[in-house]
């Protein structure tokens, strides 16, 4: 239900902003707007508590760096290695790792119990 509402909001925004004089089909214009609204919904609602964007981005960078370093060394990287890879302090690495605990995702395949 939430995704339907979010997509509908994106569609309404598309209708309001669409300019037929530009020679672009409505579906071509509307699709990125609807997808953007859905992505924004997941970005904003995927966190159990409000985490600053800086920490959300740090979490993503840590995930990427962890995967790269794990592949390179054949083991999980240390905090020091992550800090060195991202050119940040070890304290910032720990803060980013802790912020990941506030993130929760739900599978779209799990039946709704409501």
Image (cartoon, rainbow, N blue to C red):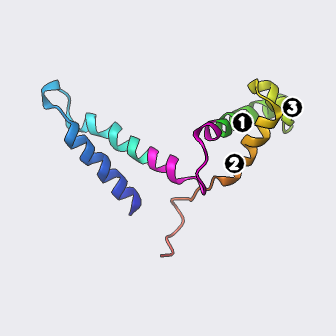
Asked if the residue at tag 2 contacts the one at tag 1, i.e. Cβ–Cβ closer than 8 Å, the answer is yes
- The residue under the point 20% across, 41% down is 16
Alpha-carbon distance for marks 1 and 2? 10 Å
Q: Is residue 64 magenta?
A: no
Q: Position of residue 64 (x, y in %)?
A: 69, 34
Quarter occupied by residue 78: top right
Magenta stretch in the rendered image: 40-57
Q: Earlier in the sequence, mark 2 or mark 3?
A: 3
Question: Badge 1, how many Cα within 10 Å: few under 14, some, many 20+?
Answer: many
Residue pointed to by mark 3:
80
Residue found at x 75% / y 48%: 98
Provide residue 50's location: percent of width, then percent of height: 58, 51
Which of 26/102 is in front?
Answer: 102
Residue 74 in sight = no
Tag shown at residue 46: none
Towards the viewer: 42 or 26: 42
Q: Picture quarter containing residue 97?
A: top right
Q: The N terminus lies in which quarter of the figure? A: bottom left
In the structure shown, which secondary structural element does the residue marked by tag 2 occupy?
Answer: helix
Q: Position of residue 45 (x, y in %)?
A: 51, 54
Question: Which residue, given by chain and number where applicable, does mark 2 sit on?
Answer: 100
Q: Could you tell me which secondary element the residue under label 1 belongs to?
A: helix
């Amino acid at each position: 239900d939430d995704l339907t509402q979010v997509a509908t909001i994106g569609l309404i925004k598309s209708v309001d902003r669409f300019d037929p004089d530009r020679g672009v089909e409505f579906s071509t214009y509307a699709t990125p707007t609807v997808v953007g609204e859905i992505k924004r919904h997941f970005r904003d609602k995927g966190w159990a508590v409000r985490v600053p964007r800086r920490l959300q981005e740090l979490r993503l960078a840590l995930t990427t760096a962890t995967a790269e370093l794990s592949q390179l060394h054949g083991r999980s990287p240390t905090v020091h290695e992550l800090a060195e890879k991202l050119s940040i302090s070890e304290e910032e690495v720990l803060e980013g790792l802790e912020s990941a605990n506030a993130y929760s995702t739900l599978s779209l395949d799990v039946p709704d119990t409501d």
